[in-house]
Amino acid sequence: MELLNQISEELQQGSVEGVENGVNKAIEENIEAEKILHEGLMAGMKVIGEKFKNDEIFVPGVLVAARAMNAGMVILKPKLIESGVESAGKVVLGTVKGDLHDVGKNLVAMMLEGAGFEVFDLGTDVPAEKFVEKAKEVDADIVGLSALLTTTMNEMETVIKALEEAGIRDEVIVMVGGAPITSEFAEEISADYYAKDASEASTIAGNIKSKIA
């Protein structure tokens, strides 16, 4: 549908106004909220994710597109709730204790929201007990851990052990990422998945929806 394609294009251009106008118009034309989400907003973010993965655009471009996505979601969310569209899953996300870096984490949050997940972003310098507390509170499906410093990498294992001690390790999928993290390290600390960037995190989360269901 032309209008939904237009929303996708406006999102890719990072036009907040264009996305807002498009979403409002689509609602006025009685297009289903789920259709606006999937064929308009999520379709646009999927293109952005692919371009980011292929180094065709960089972090600033993703952030601008994600801002437009969020603007569209503010308008669309009440309609999605009204129509009973369920989220793809609940994700508790944060940068581990001792680490104040958040650009990568913020990108992951935006990409996951764009993929239909409900994201609870705990911010930076998050202690293990806070991850556990929030995961329990919201009945999380995924816990996402970010670290950019080699000195804070081991905090990821602390979080995983805290999840085990709280008796909820088997109930959540743990995904880790950040510049110093490798798939070998993820395996070593018994994380379930390693994502090298925000686009891959979104793809992995999308692929494990069936495990969440």
Image (cartoon, rainbow, N blue to C red):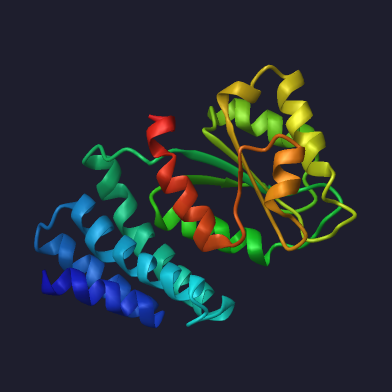
Position of the C terminus by quadrant: top left
| Residue drawn 29% across the image and 41% down it | 81
| Residue drawn 69% across the image and 29% down it | 133
**Where, by quadrant of the figure, is residue 9 drawn?**
bottom left
Q: Nearer the viewer, residue 187 or 81?
A: 187
Residue 143, position in %: x, y?
61, 39
Residue 95, position in %: x, y?
73, 52
Q: Is residue 18 above or below residue 195?
A: below
**Where, by quadrant of the figure, is residue 127 drawn?**
top right
Residue 40 lies left or right of residue 158; in this view the side is left
Name the residue at the right extreme: 151
Residue 50, position in %: x, y?
42, 70
Residue 42 lies left or right of residue 206; in this view the side is left
Residue 178, position in %: x, y?
70, 59
How many labels, in total?
0
Residue 116 lies left or right of residue 25; in this view the side is right
Name the residue at the top extreme: 167
| Residue drawn 85% across the image and 44% down it | 154
Position of the N terminus by quadrant: bottom left
**Where, by quadrant of the figure, is residue 180 drawn?**
bottom right
